[in-house]
Image (cartoon, grey):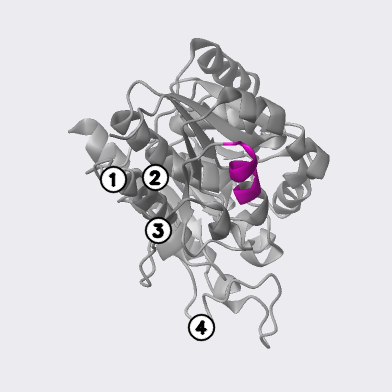
Amino acid sequence: MTNPVRRILLIKPSSLGDIVHAMPTLAALRERFPQAEVTWLVKRQWTSLVEVIGGVDHICVVERGLRGWLGQVPGLRAARFDLVVDLQGLFRSGAMARLSGCGRRIGFANAREGSPWLYTQRVAVPAAPMHAVDRYLLVAEALGAARPTEPRFDFVDRSEHRQAAEALLTQAGLAASSPWIAMNVSARWETKRWPPQHFAEAADRLSEAQALPIVFMGGPAERPETHAVMAHMRTKAVDLTGRTPVGLLPGLLRRAAVLVTNDSGPMHIAAAVGTPVVALFGPTDPVKTGPYGPGHVVLSHAVECRPCFRRDCSRAVALECLTGVQPEQVVRAVQQQLGRSRKSGSS
């Protein structure tokens, strides 16, 4: 008879979208091991997001650099985990699983950098492309969890976060009950970014046609991309870039009528909270990392080399997979999403 699982370490340190993708696996593990306490190992910059994920009992925060990671090893060993789940699949995460001292460590058989050698149980991944959410759930299934009919993304809706989100919107001149269109115009890779003049034209046309405020969102480092878009606009917009802590994003995006975005972390949060998404995809594959669930729209321009997953582009027409998407396509997609929302709201 196997020992009961009382303490679980979930290793998913980054990035924003990947953390969101891991949430249904956490929910499935909580159902499989209802008495267990779960500790989530995460990088410092994403801590406030994990703090609003339901089902997390403790957070192990790792700082930058090798010393920052190794500094957590004594605490992990003292916790005496019964099960370690590594969803990151890199040498550093596999090493932390091994250094935790736990005798039961599970991860993917095709994980990188030799990390599978550090697991005691390896989960095979089918060759056919599958979404990251479904791939992570394979680990929960291997541990005896039932595959959920609808994967659960459980964000904790705390009153202080609701008040902070409402205060931010009020300060920006937006009534709490008024609809608005969110835009996220940046992305970690330059090759994922739709041109700023395209975003500007789509924003102007939507602002004029729908009479809805356009609200730009993103982290402090993404201000230059937002400013580049706003410099091309004729109409006014609300700029919340750099003013939206990552822990507030679920609450804020839940209030948006629709999110227009590149392939980015906020895209995954919006999909997780049920906000319709219109996403621009270039070198990456929406089958694997698109907005999860039904009802979202993904736009890209068909070229023979996509998805290439490259951070540079050698085509004669640079980033044609993205630049080939025209603003009017985005406008039509947003109008369709708004139409669906109004119909579902009136039914």
Q: In this view, does 159 lie above or below 322?
A: above
Q: Name the residue under label 2.
A: 276
Q: Is residue 212 above or below residue 112?
A: above
Q: Tell me the kind of residue under disc 2.
A: Pro
Q: What element carries label 3?
A: loop
Q: What element carries label 4?
A: loop
Q: What element carries label 2?
A: loop
Choose mark 2 or mark 3, whichever is in front.
3
The residue at the point 59 percent across, 63 percent down is 112
Disc nearer the start of the sequence (1/2):
2
Q: Mark 4 points at which residue?
A: 303
Quadrant of the frame with the C terminus: top left
The magenta-colored residue range is 94-101
Q: Tell me the kind of residue under disc 3.
A: His
Q: Main structural element of the magenta stretch: helix, strand or loop? A: helix
The residue at the point 44 percent across, 27 percent down is 155
- Furthest-left residue in this view: 347
Residue 18 spot, x, y in % from top left: 53, 48
Residue 310 spot, x, y in % from top left: 64, 73
Choose mark 3 or mark 1, whichever is in front.
3
Choose mark 3 or mark 4, whichever is in front.
3
**Inter-mark Cα distance, 1 to 2:** 9 Å
Q: Is residue 310 above or below residue 227?
A: below
**Inter-mark Cα distance, 3 to 1:** 25 Å
Q: Name the residue under label 3.
A: 131
Q: Tell me the kind of residue under disc 1.
A: Arg
Disc nearer the start of the sequence (2/4):
2
Was residue 98 drawn as part of the magenta stretch in this picture? yes
Q: Name the residue under label 1.
A: 340
Quarter of the figure with residue 246: top right
Lateral position of residue 28 relative to residue 284, left or right: left
